[in-house]
Image (cartoon, rainbow, N blue to C red):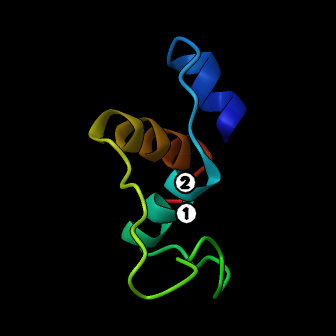
Amino acid sequence: MKKYVAEHNDGMKVSNLYIAQVKRKCGIEVGETFNLPKSEDSRQPQCPKEKEDAIVEVLKAFRMI
């Protein structure tokens, strides 16, 4: 997925965290503990809109959504 995003979006880089967040938002199952915060009060960066759109494009291209 990272390679597809980079090739189709001028070298844009996305993290596994952002991919997992978008998958969860789309209702795709990810591992139970995959990219969860270490403690309840810790903060995680949220996926920016342009990267979210690129990841959704990949999920559609791979026919996952």
Kindly identify the residue that appears in the image at 49 percent across and 46 percent down.
60
Q: Is residue 16 above or below residue 9?
A: below
Horizontal and vertical percent for residue 38?
Answer: 58, 80
Q: Which mark is residue 34?
A: none
Question: What is the crowding at mark 1: few (fewer than 14 residues within 10 Å), some, or many (at least 20)?
Answer: many
On the picture, is 53 further left or further right than 35?
A: left
Determine whether label 2 and label 1 are within 8 Å by CB: yes
Drawn side of residue 7 relative to residue 28, left or right: right
The residue wearing badge 1 is: 20
Residue bearing mark 2: 19
Percent coordinates x, y for residue 39 in the rendering? 51, 85
Percent of width and height locating residue 51: 41, 37
The disc labelled 1 sits on which kind of residue? Ala
The residue located at (38%, 44%) in the rendering is 52
Residue at point 55% right, 54% down?
19
Label 1's element? helix
Q: Secondary structure at mark 2?
A: helix
Task: From the viewer's side, name the closer residue of 26 and 14.
Answer: 14
User: What residue occupies the far top of the structure in this picture?
Assistant: 10
